[in-house]
Image (cartoon, grey):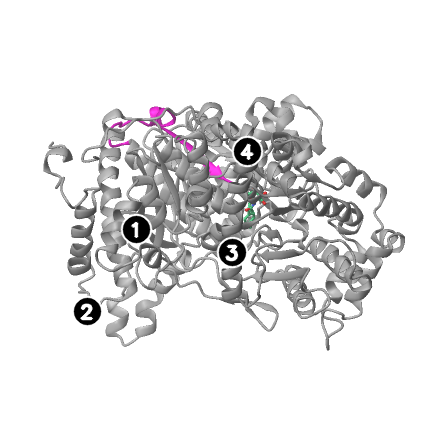
């Protein structure tokens, strides 16, 4: 078997020097894009560049795959229904270390790298935090040389494009693939048949053992599309394997001959629907049939693919858990548990017990939310109609679980009812979090507070059943994209100050601490921040049509719109400040610009109202001559990874104001702090750990703690009392109710107001005054420029632990027990 090393064209096709890059760029333009300069479009040039860079990634992927194969290394299978990788080109150049060589190669051809890079569409295959975290983790897995295949769905249409029209969010279809995608490699031969519906047959096999055969009603084909995921300055390139659904028979010729053209393509349409579009909901679970089909589709492809790769070198299944560990990114892929049991027991003939112990050793489960409406449960009848065999397997798992619980807690029927995988209370539903938990050897939350609340509430009974299974891995973010790519000015200043190496060892940022006192360094630090603010101001002018002064305090609140994230608390404070300035223009409040950004799930009415409220207030404040020199409000449309890279480096103040106990972790909070923004926030999610890291004096804390919130809730919370008791709050809410920010439509915000004054689920009114005090602390600190800059430097210096490299190292040690595999790179200079 010849190895690839001798035959591969180690020359300009993969060289890292400017000449090789220019030659292979022109080659790609002529022979892949089939274009020549006179007629080539910007997209042609972008794609030609993408092919050129992709070849260099594939060079490394071949070395990686070869090494992993030779070393029979243990691998991670990361299963996630969502990925938000962001544009690939610039990250690939950074990882390969060829940005400058490419920039020179293009200049020589009269082309500009940044101009071409802007052409790349963003793969918006996720809603928010969960999807972006998965992408950060893939970057760290490759950078830490950990063998990994990440599985997901190749949605034809990703998260909608958000447009703002007449003060409202409009959703536009995301056609990310329409100009082609140079970063994926179609793998038509890596394909699996996926069954749906039908029935099961219980038979006795030749040895008289009970066997079950599933006869699906529908079959769909799952096709793999591979995207190379490069590590930073290592030769390892892992794979993101996204599955696309196709019809087993995409054209029914017989129907066509009968002139029934519709039926001829019916199956094709039905099948492709499965990977057609991403569900744009972030939190509220909608028990849609297609959603379950999507989840099973990629879970089955992933499990069948894992077994295929395993069986390339083993013919009995016993060693499967030595070679693979599977991480469930929330419950969305949790049906993979029942699928692996089906493949091991029904297809491979294993007995239940050994199969189950394999499954337990293989799976790990990460929970990302405590919101009851986000914990997935499926109606048993829906489950039975889509996945009849898997329901039987879940019943069997449940039976054995409840037998164990009964043995431990005889007569404790309440505990049995709470722990059963089948919720009998609301018309029999399958509890996916409980299924994932009982099938995993490790269950983790994504921040210390969240993991504690998980043990004490949602999964309390399972914690009592087996405490050793529960752990915490606080989230992290990749410094490659969110510092080096997004904030090159800061990256240069840091390297000039503490030397190279910090991008792979972020704790080294701590070496910046001594410089926090230096006036020169502070001035350089402020200069970097100012040029990032000027860049964002230009963007805001273009995309939101609002003129922004970069000298003002940039107060930034960007994340999905959700009541628990309390964008409306921010706006209420903003309104209060506006009314006060109207009353007393002499108030000594430093000029501030409020930036908001984020999408609302299309069906989430109150979240959409919050966007309208922000836009309504912006229109009034920005056009009010008496205040607009000191207050400006901007809603940045279509928040995404691409424009987030402009936003995080430009922020002075990061808004992390969720109700304590609701935000599992947050990751934007980490990106802001690492880029030198100070946080105004509650003791929620990872805010707690950020405040511990940076020091309480460098964090504007406010609000009820999780304990206090549950205390008030238990005692009975009457939001109207707070309205009555606080004149500032009353003035702001009254102005809203009076239609001050919705001229001609006074009732526009009725629902939002009613929700606040009647039940205020997320304690906005209760935290209003404290939030105002924290904001005044921020004003005062801002007026002491030197002090603010010092705090900003210390935030960056002390947040190295929030690197996704640290998080992945913890997963490797605590959950996956996988070791790095160093890949010697051929052809690399
Ligand atoms: C079924 C609908 C649905 C879709 C997505 C339910 C739940 C989700 C995700 C779990 C929501 C999500 O993105 N959660 C966020 O995950 C981040 C990464 O761990 C955390 O930092 C955020 O706090 C959490 O809200």
Task: Name the image quarter holding the N terminus.
Answer: top left
Which mark is drawn over residue 38? 2
Query: Residue 333, percent across and down?
Result: 47, 43
Query: Where is mark 3, residue-wise?
Result: 534
**Nearer to me, 536 or 175:** 536
Residue 709 visible to the viewer: yes
Label 1 – label 3 distance at C-alpha: 35 Å
- Give the side of residue 211 with respect to residue 784, left or right: left
Give the image quarter of residue 418: top right
Q: Disc 1 designates what residue?
A: 184
Say above or below: 269 vs 391: below
Is the residue marked by circle 2 packed among few (<14), some (14-19), or many (20+) residues within 10 Å? few
Q: Provide the residue span drawn in magenta.
A: 311-330
**Residue 685 visible (yes or no):** no
Residue 219 relative to residue 428: left or right = left
Q: Quadrant of ligand 1?
A: top right
Depth check, mark 4 against mark 1: the one in front is 4
Does the residue at mark 2 contact the one at mark 3 (Cβ under 8 Å)? no
Q: How far is the residue under mark 2 from the one under mark 3?
A: 36 Å
| Label 1: element kind | loop
Given this view, does label 2 or label 3 mark the residue nearer the observer? 3
Q: Give the Cα distance between marks 4 and 2.
A: 50 Å
Of mark 4 and mark 3, the one earlier in the sequence is 3
């Amino acid at each position: 078997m010849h190895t690839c090393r001798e035959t591969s064209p180690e020359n300009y096709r993969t060289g890292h020097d400017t000449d090789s890059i220019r030659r292979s760029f022109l080659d790609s333009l002529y022979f892949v894009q089939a274009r020549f300069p006179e007629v080539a479009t910007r997209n042609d040039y972008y794609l030609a560049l993408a092919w050129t860079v992709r070849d260099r990634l594939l060079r490394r992927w071949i070395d990686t795959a070869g090494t992993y194969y030779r070393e029979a290394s243990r691998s991670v299978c990361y299963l996630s229904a969502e990925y938000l990788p962001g544009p690939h080109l610039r990250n690939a150049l950074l990882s390969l270390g060829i940005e400058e060589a490419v920039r020179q190669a293009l200049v020589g051809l009269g082309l500009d790298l940044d101009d071409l890079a802007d052409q790349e569409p963003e793969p918006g295959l996720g809603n928010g935090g969960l999807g972006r975290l998965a992408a950060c983790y893939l970057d760290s897995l490759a950078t830490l040389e950990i063998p990994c295949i990440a599985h997901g769905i190749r949605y034809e249409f990703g998260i909608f494009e958000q447009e703002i029209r007449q003060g409202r969010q409009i959703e536009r279809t995301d056609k990310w693939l329409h100009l082609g995608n140079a970063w994926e490699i179609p793998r038509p031969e890596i394909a699996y048949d996926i069954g749906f519906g039908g029935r099961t047959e219980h038979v006795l096999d030749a040895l008289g053992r009970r066997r079950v055969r599933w006869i699906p009603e529908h079959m769909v084909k799952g096709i793999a599309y591979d995207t190379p995921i490069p590590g930073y300055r290592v030769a390892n390139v892992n794979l993101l394997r996204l599955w696309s659904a196709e019809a087993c028979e995409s054209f029914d010729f017989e129907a066509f001959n009968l002139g029934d053209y519709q039926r001829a393509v019916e199956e094709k349409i039905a099948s492709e629907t499965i990977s057609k579009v991403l569900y744009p909901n972030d939190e509220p679970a909608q028990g849609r049939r297609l959603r379950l089909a999507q989840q099973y589709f990629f879970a089955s492809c992933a499990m069948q693919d894992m077994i295929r790769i395993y069986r390339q070198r083993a013919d009995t299944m016993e060693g499967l858990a030595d070679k693979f560990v599977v991480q469930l990114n929330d419950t969305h892929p949790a049906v993979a548990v029942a699928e692996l049991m089906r493949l091991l027991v029904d297809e491979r003939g294993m007995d239940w017990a050994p199969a189950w112990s394999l499954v337990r050793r293989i799976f790990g489960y990460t929970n990302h939310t405590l919101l009851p409406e986000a914990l997935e449960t499926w109606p048993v009848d829906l489950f039975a109609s889509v996945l009849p065999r898997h329901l039987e397997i879940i019943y069997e798992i449940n039976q054995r679980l409840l037998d164990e619980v009964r043995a431990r807690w005889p007569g404790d029927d309440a505990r049995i009812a709470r722990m059963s995988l089948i919720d009998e209370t609301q018309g029999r539903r399958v509890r996916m979090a409980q299924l994932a938990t009982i099938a995993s050897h490790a269950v983790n939350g994504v921040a210390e507070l969240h993991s504690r609340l998980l043990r004490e509430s949602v999964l309390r009974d399972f914690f009592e059943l087996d405490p050793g299974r529960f752990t915490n891995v606080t989230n992290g973010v990749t410094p490659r994209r969110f510092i080096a790519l997004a904030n090159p000015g800061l990256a240069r200043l840091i390297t000039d100050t503490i030397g190279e190496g910090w991008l792979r060892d972020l704790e080294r940022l701590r070496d910046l601490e001594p410089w926090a006192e230096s006036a020169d360094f502070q001035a350089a630090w402020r200069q970097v921040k100012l040029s990032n603010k000027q860049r964002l101001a230009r963007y805001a002018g273009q995309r939101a049509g609002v003129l922004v002064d970069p000298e003002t305090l940039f107060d930034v609140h960007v994340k999905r719109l959700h009541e628990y994230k309390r964008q409306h608390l921010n706006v209420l404070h903003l309104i209060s400040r506006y009314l006060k300035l109207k009353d007393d223009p002499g108030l000594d409040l430093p000029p501030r610009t409020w930036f908001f950004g984020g999408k609302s799930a299309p069906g989430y009415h109150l979240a959409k109202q919050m966007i309208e409220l922000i836009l309504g207030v912006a229109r009034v404040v920005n056009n009010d001559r008496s205040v607009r020199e000191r207050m400006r409000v901007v809603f940045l449309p279509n928040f995404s990874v691409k424009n987030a890279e402009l936003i995080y480096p430009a922020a002075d103040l990061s808004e992390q104001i969720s109700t304590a106990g609701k935000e599992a972790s947050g990751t934007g909070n980490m990106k802001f702090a690492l880029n030198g923004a100070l946080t105004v926030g509650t003791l929620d999610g990872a805010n707690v750990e950020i405040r511990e890291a940076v020091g309480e004096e460098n964090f504007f804390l406010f609000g009820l703690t999780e304990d206090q919130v549950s205390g008030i809730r238990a005692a009975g919370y009457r939001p109207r009392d707070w309205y009555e008791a606080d004149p500032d709050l009353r003035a702001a809410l009254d102005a809203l109710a009076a239609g001050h920010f919705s001229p001609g439509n006074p009732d526009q915000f009725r629902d939002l107001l009613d929700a606040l004054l009647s039940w205020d689920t997320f304690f906005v009114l209760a935290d209003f005054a404290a939030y105002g005090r924290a904001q005044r602390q921020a004003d005062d600190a801002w007026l002491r420029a030197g002090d603010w800059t010092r705090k900003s430097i210390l935030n960056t210096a002390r947040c190295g632990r929030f690197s996704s490299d640290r998080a992945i190292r913890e997963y490797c040690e605590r959950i996956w027990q996988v070791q790095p595999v160093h890949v010697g790179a051929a052809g690399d200079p």
